[in-house]
Amino acid sequence: MRLQAAWAVPAGVMLTVAAVHPFMVRHMGLSPWHGGGFGMFADLDSPNRRAITVRVTAGGESREMPARSLGSVGRWLHEAKALPTPYRLQRVARAVADIPAVHAGRPEAVEVVVWSLDFDPRENAVSRRPFRTHRLDLGRRTGDAAAGAAR
């Protein structure tokens, strides 16, 4: 009886992971390479191949910020690549808005875009496409930031 239980528990865990993983990939944006994915080798979409762009609008000008200039946000950028939920993208946008060296004055908006690779079999070509986007509108208020809208 103990032998059956010892065998059934790991099998149950593996079946649960196998059942939940496709949902997380399709609906939550989880990379197929994370979360116990069984089809990871058949997909181009891995966190190392995803890119994040951060665009800050301040003083009426919009400019893209290089990731190397966002040193303290690096860990969150990596997490957002693997699982780009609205919460994680908003956390990145708020952290960027709070870095005074990144922008002159108070930013009006921060947009975070996660890009993934897409393969077109007809053209036999790989291209980047926007995968998840989050815009945090800060407006011209001096108090707390307004909530952003995830797309």
Image (cartoon, helix red, strand yellow):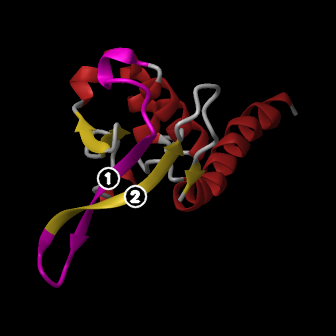
Q: In the rendered image of this protein, does residue 32 appear above or below residue 99?
A: below
Residue 109 locus on image (x, y percent) = 45, 42
Q: Nearer the viewer, residue 55 or 81?
A: 55
Q: Residue at x 36, y 22 (%)?
A: 74
Instruction: State the mark number for residue 50.
Output: none
Q: In the rendered image of this protein, does residue 95 appear above or below residue 130?
A: above
Q: Nearer the viewer, residue 100 or 133?
A: 100
Question: Tags 1 and 2 in contact by the CB under 8 Å rule?
Answer: yes
**Quadrant occupied by the N terminus:** top right
- Tell me the residue that label 1 is attached to: 115
Q: Which residues are magenta?
A: 99-125
Task: Identify the image quadrant of residue 96.
Answer: top left
Asked if residue 108 lies left or right of residue 126, the reply is right
Q: In the rendered image of this protein, does residue 39 appear above or below residue 5?
A: below
Instruction: State the mark number for residue 131.
Output: 2
Residue 145 locus on image (x, y percent) = 60, 32
Q: Nearer the viewer, residue 9 or 74?
A: 74
Q: Secondary structure at mark 2?
A: strand
Q: Hey, what amino acid is under mark 1? A: Trp
Q: Hey, what amino acid is under mark 2? A: Phe
- Mark 1 or mark 2: whose residue is earlier in sequence: 1
Classed neighbour count for the residue bearing mark 2: other residues with Cα under 10 Å, few (<14), some (14–19), many (≥20): some
